Image: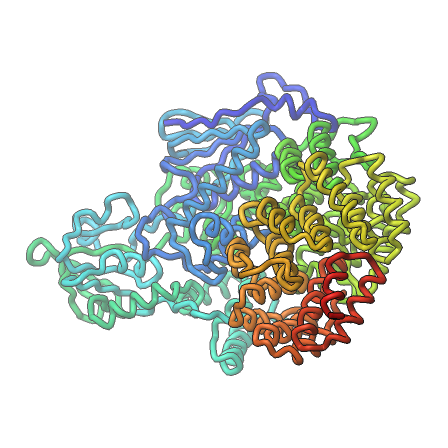
Amino acid sequence: MVSVVPVVSSSAVASAESAEVPEPAESGRPSRPTVAVVGAGAAGALVAVQLCEAAARRRIALDLVLVDPAPEAGRGVAYATEVPEHRLNVPVGGMSCYPDDPGHFRRWLCRHGESTVTAADFASRYRYGSYLADTLGRAVIAAHGTVSVRRLRTRATGCSDAADGRLELRLADGGAVTADSVVLATGPAAGRASWAPAELVTSDRFVSRPWSAGALDDVGDADDVLLVGTGLTAVDLALVLDRPGRTVHAVSRSGLLPQPHAVAPLPAVPPPPGLAGLPFHRLRRELTRHFAATRRVHGDWRPALDGLRPEIVRLWQGLTDDERAEFLGRDATPWNVHRHRMAPSTAETVARARAARRLRIHAGRVAAAAPGQDGGLVVSLADGRELSVGWVVDCTGPGLRADAGGEPLWSGLLADGLAVPGPLGIGVSTDQGRLLDAEGHPGRPLFTLGASRRGELWETTAIPEIRAQAKEVAEAVLAPLARAPRSVRRRPTDQFGLPLSTHAAAAASFRCGLGRVITVRAKAAEAFARATESDPGFALGHAALALLGHECGADVDVARELADAQRSVRERGDERERSFVDVVTRRITEHDAQGGGAGRGAGAGDGDTALFEHLERYPDDAFALGIAVPTIAFSGVTDLDGTLALGLVERTAPAYAGHWFHTSLLSFVRQEQGRIEEAGELARAALAEEPASGHAVHALAHVHYESGEHGTGRDWLDGWIGNQGRGAVHRAHFSWHVALHELALDDSAAVRRRWFAQLAPGQVNGVRALVDSGSLLWRARMSRNWTGRVPVDGVLDAVARELVERPATAFTALHSAVALTAAGDLPALRRLSTHAAGADPVQREVIVPLCGALEAVLEEEWATAVRELRGLLPSLRRVGGSAAQREVIEETLLYALVEAGHSDTARDLLEQRLDRRASPLDRRRLAGLNV
């Protein structure tokens, strides 16, 4: 049965500006090349994912044919089991489909109902099969229009040369596929049970292929079973067969079960240098010492083996065939026992079964078998012991030879000289995955990966190795298919004239997204997503999505988009685009490593340094400049006095020649400097040219507030929100600014109406609710403009608890502390303080004492609160954000001064504020002190 995934024509891609043009079709040869992948298990799925995504990025039109009789791609034998106890033997963090995106599988699990999973957990094998199938499906859909995909549910039985250097696959259903390249992803070869005596092989109580459908259906619930082999296959089957009243025996020459993974794994310990090229006896001695030393220091041998893993291929390839044979005869069993481990939960289940004597492990060799009572078998071991069982199951694992299972495809390739055995006859010989023929040449476009390369690599059967090979094979397959790009006079550009490495349709979507970013309007991420859907290889589109997800909370997979940006810019990007992707990469990775963003501290980090250097070379990169200035959209660069952002804005001015975007940023910087009148003039000039400029509106909102023009500011900003501001991405923050004016006007009724209409949970969620809605409630309470209990519990419910109690930035932490104080949640405030004590320097030095001061407020220890809050005011700028946002702490101090009876100090503070700006609220409070 053939399953065909329909595709649309690639003419739209081919006709786009700077697209690649296929060469004219040769006589009798299709214009679209065909790639056939034999096997759609894990290895085949991983190759297909890489082929689809890389071909789509590079706009290489091709037909992809997957040949496999399985009902679902991605599962193969390993991941088709539905037994919940069958767990992966590699932690979640090592099982991503992508070598450059190790967290992909964990994030997939989080999105599919396992939100608490960690990289150290062990998922079920069936779940992993679902992940492979889903990832392949998404890759096929994303490549739709460039790559057509067909599933042929049959077996490939042969492969031979065809015309024009192509290959022909013969199929079990009588059909054939002619392909430009063939990838053999057939998985491990089946074993031949050569260990089994003849009377056992012919018995109907012998199960030679236990993973075949229905292989164990006839095993009765009361039948004892002998598993021959004690590796991971035997462990899995023991879990399936274990039940009260049955004894499961397992026998192998060593009688050793796989070791368990550590419940709390330690970091890998790298091996000592200089191991490569050592004679085997010295290599063995050095590694034995390394393992012993690691165990002495760390109490566990596992970190040594985990640290050795990246070196295994190099060390194996440095051995002679005689040394490899010595390893196989002497060390392979202990190596496998320690290298291929059980998940901790699996090990616990096995230990319970052994303790109950339902699972018994024997060291020995099967010597003979004879019929027993009730139709069972009596199995004799070489040492004379006998085991009476109902069934014997072969768990010795796959064969080492490529044709060990008698598959006609591999047998034919070897017989015809299209493939040759690998070292010691294990697997086949390749040149970086391309099969060598009988003459030792990689002459044909015939590739393989995984278990078939074990002879030359040894470490090649686990997902971390297979995914890397899949990427290499896809690169090799696509390399000769790439066409030289059509000569074009000019690439499309953004609205500031910077060239874009994409076609016209994707460039139009990118310009739309950039326009929304610089005006601070909603749906920028949707526009950038349209750009990457139109051109999956458009690096700037992926980088923009990663940045918006990271800093603005856009609903995108940040790590995935960042990885796509890095892949794409390597393949197709100019120097400016490579520099921009590097900036985005550094900002995201720096934040993840240090809890950066607003409040990273006084000095410029690696991400800031990269951003400075980028803007020195490309001052007209508006996207980069917008990232650098800490306004309403991005966290920007942070320092103690704001000179970094100011310097960037002033130095880039010549590149913009008074453009409204640059003028908007400059107006915001000027108001932060206290140059209020100049900031107002700049903001109004920008708005005259672009009334939707969110940066200019934001700057003018601050100008009105700091100027004491509260009535004018309220009316103007309220009108803008109802008109041009309807599409603003941070509309709630503008509403917060209106509410500040209403608060300064001492209009408590207006503040309440504003909060419930535009700032209550449901209207605002996430960090915006914490920063805007929560802080407004506290300020209203401190100024006695909100009587009774403030509804801050709803605000906290609208924010993830992790964000509240373990915030990544000092800016968020300040607002968490304020909201928790408003809620009267002293235990949570103390937990926040504990978190801040172990976070970045700004959290340690500012947030920890702030939490202490707010604890004093809650406990009504007013003298302590006053002392600690006054001491904090000079350092608050380090937290980031605007002066108007940080003013919430000054409001708290003012309240504490009054409660502590420090009327004179409160009066001085109010008079200083009134000298700076008019405020009916402050006048009322001052009058109250003078009574």
Q: Is residue 735 left or right of residue 907?
A: left
In the depicted structure, whether residue 567 falls above or below residue 779: above
Q: Position of residue 492 (x, y in %)?
A: 78, 30
Residue 331 vs residue 861, the one in the foreground: 861
Q: Is residue 856 visible?
A: yes
Colouring convention used in this rendered image of the protein: rainbow
In the depicted structure, whether residue 408 falls above or below residue 234: above
Going by the picture, which residue comes out furthest to the top? 27
Image point (58%, 67%), residue name:
821
Q: Position of residue 225 (x, y in %)?
A: 19, 59
Residue 228 vs residue 780, the one in the foreground: 780
Q: Position of residue 380 (x, y in %)?
A: 17, 64
Residue 606 quadrant: bottom right
Q: Quadrant of the N terminus?
A: top left
Going by the picture, which residue comes out furthest to the left? 374
Image point (66%, 57%), residue name:
589
Residue 174 vs residue 58, the one in the foreground: 58
Going by the picture, which residue comes out furthest to the bottom? 296
Going by the picture, which residue comes out furthest to the front? 931
Residue 885 vs residue 835, the one in the foreground: 885
Q: Is residue 792 left or right of residue 516?
A: left
Q: Position of residue 494 (x, y in %)?
A: 78, 35
Image point (77%, 75%), residue name:
904
Residue 482 quadrant: top right
Q: Is residue 809 visible?
A: no
Give the mark count: 0
Q: Is residue 394 left or right of residue 642?
A: left
Q: Quadrant of the C terminus?
A: bottom right
Q: Is residue 548 left or right of residue 404?
A: right
